[in-house]
Image (cartoon, helix red, strand yellow):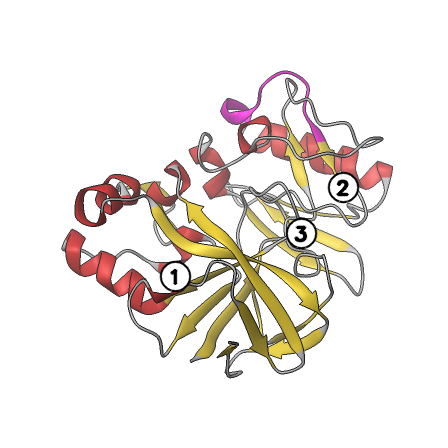
Amino acid sequence: MRIDTMYRYPVKGLTPEPLTHTELHPGRAIDWDRAFALAQGDSGFDPATPAWRPKTEFLCLARNLEAAQLTARFEPATGILTLIAPDGAALDAEPLTTTGRAAITAFITAAVPGAIRGTPQFVHVDGHSFCDHDGPVISLIGLPSLRSLSDAAGAPRQPMRFRANLYLTGLEPWEELSWIGRTLAIGEARLRVSERINRCAATCVNPETRQRDANPVKELMDHFGHVDCGVFAEVLQAGRIAAGDAIRLLA
């Protein structure tokens, strides 16, 4: 069993960035994964006292199809976030500064006005991850499970619909759903699998066309009797992981 591909999603709801390797840290998500988000004007998120809030309080694919039209790239070495709007307009800004976040807020608001509620705020808090789980986790999906879903649906269901951090190969379909409470070893790193991932309407968005064209949540329920696809894991022990690394399920 191995890591096939790895991704992070610097801005919640926006495009992924492939990774060749990364360093894992106990109790943390992948570095810069869901590190930024656009909080809607009616969001209860307070950067001064950061706490988990539901995805719908932010710009997110589950509610805002328009978010799929934005492209995002973040370069940690320079601290620059590049955004590209549907019309091709682009912005380079520093999301770690107040001025930069204000510029990003204005750019997204102008680019996808129909997705914005009230007065939004682009937010970042050091060490906080805007993931859909109420704690910092890493998401994993077995590619054989997605092939099983595609076969049942009668059409391809692109892996990136599910926005996982690690896509795995060399396991049985749906095997990962049985790992709850188990520990995975990837080199020196150790991850404890904590729970299944209940899927939402974000999976309806085709990452290639950036349009809604399927309903994987309904397909999961109709064909498998649940809406789970992939698992969350918590980092217990630090270590470097890379695409191609072997994964061991510890006793």
Q: Which mark is residue 124?
A: 2
Tell me if residue 114 comes above or below residue 186 in the rendering.
above
Q: Which mark is residue 178?
A: 1
Instruction: Name which of mark 2 and mark 1 comes first in the sequence.
Output: 2
User: Which region of the structure is painted magenta?
Assistant: 113-121
Q: CA distance from mark 3 to mark 1?
A: 39 Å
Kind of residue sitting beneath label 1: Ser
* Rendered residue at 50%/38% (across/down): 67
Instruction: Locate the N terminus and report the quarter of the image it occupies.
Output: bottom left
* Residue nearer the viewer, 182 or 126: 182
Judged from the image, the secondary structure of the residue bearing numbered disc 2 is: loop
Q: Would you say residue 133 sits in the magenta stretch?
A: no
Tell me if 238 is positioned left or right of 207 in this view. Answer: right
Q: CA distance from mark 2 to mark 1?
A: 34 Å
Kind of residue sitting beneath label 3: Thr
Residue 168 in the image: state x and y as whole percent.
43, 71
Q: Would you say residue 118 sits in the magenta stretch?
A: yes
Kind of residue sitting beneath label 2: His
Q: Quadrant of residue 189?
A: bottom right
Residue topped by disc 3: 82
Tell me if 96 is positioned left or right of 122 in this view. Answer: right
* Residue nearer the viewer, 212 or 157: 157
